[in-house]
Image: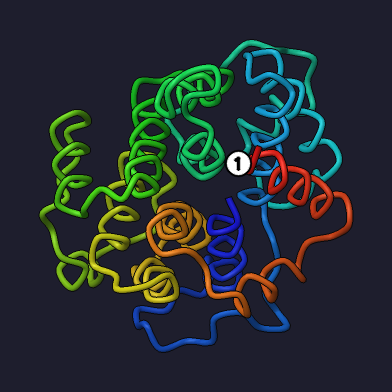
Amino acid sequence: MLGAIIGDITGSVYEFKNVKTKDFPLLTDESFFTDDTVMTIAVAEALMNGGQPDDFIDSLKKYGRLYPRVGYGRGFYLWLVSDDRAPYGSWGNGAAMRVSPCGWFGGRGGSAEELAERSAAVTHDHTEGLKGARATAAAIDMARAGRSKAEIRGHIEKKYGYDLSRKLDDIRPGYKFDESCQGTVPEAIIAFLESDGFEDALRNAVSLGGDSDTLAAITGGIAEAAYGIPQALADKGLSYLDRPLRAVYDRWRDFIRL
């Protein structure tokens, strides 16, 4: 999940100040983690706690309340601070931005795609929300298994109906902020498919503009599985986390190696 975290931090300063180029500072003194990172950490803890619906609900609410001002959408924030445990039909890209741990957890209580749906359904139970989470986790799981980009593209297009044939150069000029899964996940996957390394994938994602932290979080989660993360960049990304979030990440890192 570190790829998603670094993607989020990279995109954080460009969400409301879009850059339509790949030439930009990657991690700066102004960069910071947002709700994408906090909720990714929450999903990881939920999986370590059992990965059942109540585990996801408890963990999302726990970390959402610990970090209440990191950029949640209004509907999700109202769910976080309420006592309501029912989903609210969201199709937002929050379902996909937080799902990367599920891509590394497949086979331990369900396939990656099944776990992704379970993690999303506690809030984002709209068809598009579930689809975005499942597609992202599938791409991560396949990349981890060494499947080719052509295989990943074919599986996602056939099973989820996303058009991954478009080129970034064609998408970029007219792309605008879009908080939906259907308007974010395909573009984030294309950013990975056109990349030649982890950093290049993040630059592709941010260069589209729009919801740059979430685009880069989704792309970064897939890119980590495909390429790994250069150690210097991993160390730099981790330096932005505070102690509670870093503690969960360290526990996850050890847990996933079991």
Specify few, some or many for label 1: CA neighbours under 10 Å numbering under 14, 14-19, or 20 or more. few
**5 relative to 111 in the view: left or right:** right
Residue 18 figure quarter: bottom left
Task: Identify the element where label 1 is drawn.
Answer: loop
Residue 9 figure quarter: bottom right
Q: Of residues 192 and 142, which is closer to you in this image?
A: 142
From what the image shows, is residue 241 above or below residue 117?
below
Q: Which residue is mark 1?
A: 73
**Residue at 37 percent of width and 73 percent of height:** 197
**Residue at 31 percent of width and 39 percent of height:** 182
Residue 27 image position (x, y, % from top left) = 61, 79
Residue 38 image position (x, y, % from top left) = 71, 47
Residue 22 figure quarter: bottom left
**Residue at 42 percent of width and 33 percent of height:** 133
Q: How is the image coloured?
A: rainbow
**Residue at 76 percent of width and 21 percent of height:** 58
Residue 132 image position (x, y, % from top left) = 37, 35
Residue 219 image position (x, y, % from top left) = 41, 57
Residue pushed farthest front? 258
Tag 1: residue type?
Gly
